[in-house]
Structure formats: C-alpha cells, structure tokens
Amino acid sequence: MAIQRTFSIIKPDATKRNLTGAIVAKFEAAGLRVVASKRIQMTLAQAETFYGVHSERPFFGELCEFMISEPIVVQVLEGEDAIAKNREVMGATNPADAAEGTIRKDFALSIGENSVHGSDAPETAAEEIAFFFSGLELVG
Ligand code: ATP
Ligand code: MG
C-alpha cells in the first residue's frame, strides 16, 4: 500500500476539553504525519454541505449544530495506508463499540459527540481535503 493522505477533524467535544494534543499524539504514534492543520469554526451552511451525505438521517440537524458549537481542528494526515489507519486509530463510530486504545474509546462522549472525523475512501479524502484547504496550504 502506498503513501496516502486523508482528512481528519478534531470535533468540538474534543477541542472544548483541550484534547487536541492528546489526539494528535495518537495519530503520530500510529505513524501518521500531520501535514496541514488549522483551527476554525464552521458556519451552519458549511457543516450542512460537509455532512450533506447524511442530510436524510434523523440526526442530521443535531450533528450540524454540534459541529458548529465550538471550534474544530481540521487536518491532513499522511502515511502508509493513511485512510484505513486513521479509521483504525479513531475506533468505531459509537464509543461503546470502539476497541481499547482508540481515540473514541478513550475520549468520545457518545455516538454523536465522538471526538474525531476521518475520511472513508480515497475519493472522499480528496474532496474533504479540497473543501477545507487550498493548494497553497498543502506542502508537497
Ligand atoms: P465520521 O464520518 O465523523 O468520521 P463515521 O464515518 O464513523 O464518522 P458516519 O456514519 O459517517 O460515522 O456518521 C457521521 C457522524 O454522524 C458520526 O461520526 C457521528 O458524529 C454522527 N452520528 C452517526 N450516527 C449517529 C447517531 N445514531 N446519533 C447521533 N449522531 C450520529
Ligand atoms: Mg463517515
């Protein structure tokens, strides 16, 4: 498997509890390098666009309100098999199902307030990176 890039968000529940460094440490320990990072606060329109794939789900409104409730940290992670590795380090969506040592097992509060987002495929990784970062912010 080649070197890949993936997109990651440290969500409001985690930034609020000052867990940014602890979460980044888990990515770095797993061999993922932070190649771009910034702290932002999304507008409702941005959150609705970003999570558009979930617009028909019952939790869509709650999810978007949560994602704009506090600043988030958006990042690009790079490494061998980065998309799958990131999701492995994140753990299952519901922290009750997450494996020991994963970010969600250690830090998530609930299935909604689950501390991190990670892209699920090469196409979504490319789209999500381009949604938040310009070419000038991405070192080759
Ligand atoms: P993410 O896309 O954030 O990396 P994921 O791929 O593990 O997480 P998805 O099924 O894509 O999970 O859901 C997107 C996000 O929507 C979840 O991370 C969570 O914050 C929220 N979510 C998912 N299911 C529920 C639910 N049943 N109730 C409330 N929020 C939910
Ligand atoms: Mg998802």
Image (cartoon, helix red, strand yellow):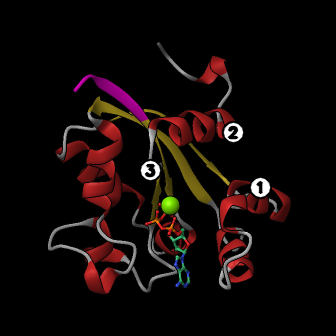
Q: How many numbered marks appear?
A: 3
> CB under 8 Å between callouts 3 and 1?
no
- Name the mark nearer the viewer: 3 or 2: 3
Left or right: 119, with 85 as reference point: right
The CA distance from mark 2 to mark 1 is 10 Å
User: For residue 49, which numbered disc appears in the image?
Assistant: 1
Give the label on residue 131, or none: 2
Q: CA distance from mark 3 to mark 1?
A: 17 Å
Numbered mark located on residue 120 in the image? 3
Is tag 3's residue or tag 2's residue first in the polypeptide sequence? Answer: 3
Which element is circle 1 on?
helix
Q: Which residues are magenta?
A: 1-5
Say the numbered circle drawn on residue 95: none
Q: Does mark 3 have its CB less than 8 Å from ligand 2?
A: yes
The yes-or-no answer for disc 2 within 8 Å of ligand 1 is no
Q: Position of residue 56 (x, y in %)?
A: 73, 74
Q: Is mark 1 within 8 Å of ligand 1?
A: no
